[in-house]
Amino acid sequence: MARKHLKITLVQYGVIKERFLAFLNGKTHIEADEAFINAVRSYYEVFLKSERVGKMVQSGGCCSDDFRDVFRINIEKRVRSLPDIDSLKISKDTVLTLWMSKFDAIYRGQDQDQDNSNRRLSKANYMSTSAELIMSKEQLYDMFQNILSIKKFEHQMIFNSAQLDNNDEQAATIRRELDGRMKQAESLQRQRGLMPKFVHKEMETLYIDELKKSINDLMSNLESLPVRGGSEQKPLRSRRGASHSRHGSSSSSGMHSSTKSLHNDGNLDDSETGLSKLAFVLNFNVNITCKEVRGLKSIPTNRIVYCTMEVEGGEKYRTEHAEAGKPVWESLAEFPTNQILPIIKVKLYMENPGILSLDDNKLGKLSLQIDPTFNKTNWWIDMVKCKNTITEELKVKLDVRMEKPQNLKMCGWCYARGKNVWKSWKRRYYALVQ
């Protein structure tokens, strides 16, 4: 059921005109610019002082919302007709909202005696006007971005960098902060020039000791927070001597051996619970875009060719059909995988026009091993020709990118050997996982 608005009486109508006249004469404490004052003067002269409005109020045909809508429509026409100014930091919607709030303040007589019952609106009308003054989330974003002079994409970057998704991220951030404070305290101890001035010489040593003690207390409090994976948190002061890297090798020794080597190298107790294999599972996304092929001059231009793309152990994607005279595509294939060093395969086929033929003719292929740091665009690479291919050389234009997960902090090739396993020096691929 629609809400019934209270009618304006002749007494209230006279009070409203007195309030707007007092504002125009400067007898109120409501701050306003010249444009708003001109809008209120036009509203007062044309609408409030009109004889037709007086007759409508006398007959009971006006309510408070009618008076408010007339002013809102009037200022919307005024503000919308203004040209856009780049140096203006406030949008037109914000100006309309501010003007309506000032109109409500004049209409309710907020700066006058509130005890006078003739100078107050009903509670229902007050709640209805207050509800319209609430700004939406998008308007608040625009207002704060204009005030702080931050562009929208910069605001999104700041927002993303400030996110701490889980306890591991929070603990790692606190550890980095505490480690930086400890290094700062050590630099103060080495370089006396950075030390604050004290009355006595002995107070410098006391200051350094108290600073380190406060950092150690924070570190000990942080040790109670367990990390993901089920292993107990080691003391932070001894973490430099222990290995914090997760070994992900391309050799066939397996994930179980790397877990065992991690515990042996960290000198952990035998009774400590080992990390589960789920702690080492990484989910990657491999994006491959096949764009163009060169070297098909010996093939008739009306023959149909296409490419297939796959990641070893996953599904196979196929591009659209194209004529050999213009082998151009824009086919993007996305492959989810948990292999840190996946092998991608791209093959070029020519459609067999025979009615009874089952398989198409393979013209060329390529295999490539990539890692999470691999990112190339518009990359021309040679394909290996098949035996029945007449062309001299085949080249394919690819976009290849591998997205790494958030818990993979660093990875790369390194020559290393272990104490109990991988005892020989060998080039292996290592990944630092949090």
Image (tube, rainbow, N blue to C red):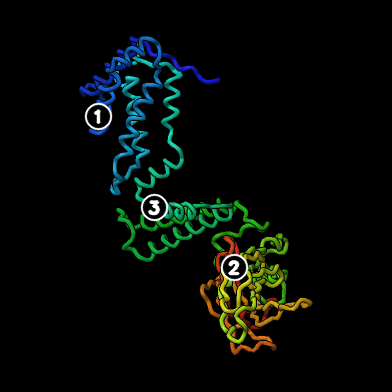
Q: Mark 3 and mark 2 in contact? Answer it, CB < 8 Å.
A: no
Give the mark nearest the N terminus, 1 or 2.
Answer: 1
Single out the mark in the foreground, 3 or 2: 2
- Asked if residue 243 shows in the view, the reply is no
Label at residue 424: none
| Alpha carbons under labels 1 and 3: distance apart | 33 Å
Q: Residue at x 29, y 44 (%)?
A: 83
Q: Residue at x 73, y 69 (%)?
A: 256
Q: Position of residue 261 (x, y in %)?
A: 68, 71
Type of residue at label 2? Ser
Figure check: 379 above or below 278:
below
Where disc 2 sits, the SS reads strand
Type of residue at label 1? Ile
Q: Position of residue 287 (x, y in %)?
A: 59, 67
Label at residue 331: 2
Q: Residue at x 38, y 47 (%)?
A: 145
| Alpha carbons under labels 1 and 2: distance apart | 61 Å
- Residue that mark 3 sits on: 151
Figure check: 212 above or below 359:
above
Image mark count? 3
- Asked if residue 132 shows in the view, the reply is yes
Q: Quadrant of the N terminus?
A: top right
**For the residue carrying disc 1, how many other residues have a C-alpha within 10 Å: few (<14), some (14-19), or many (20+)?**
some
Residue furthest toward the left?
Answer: 25
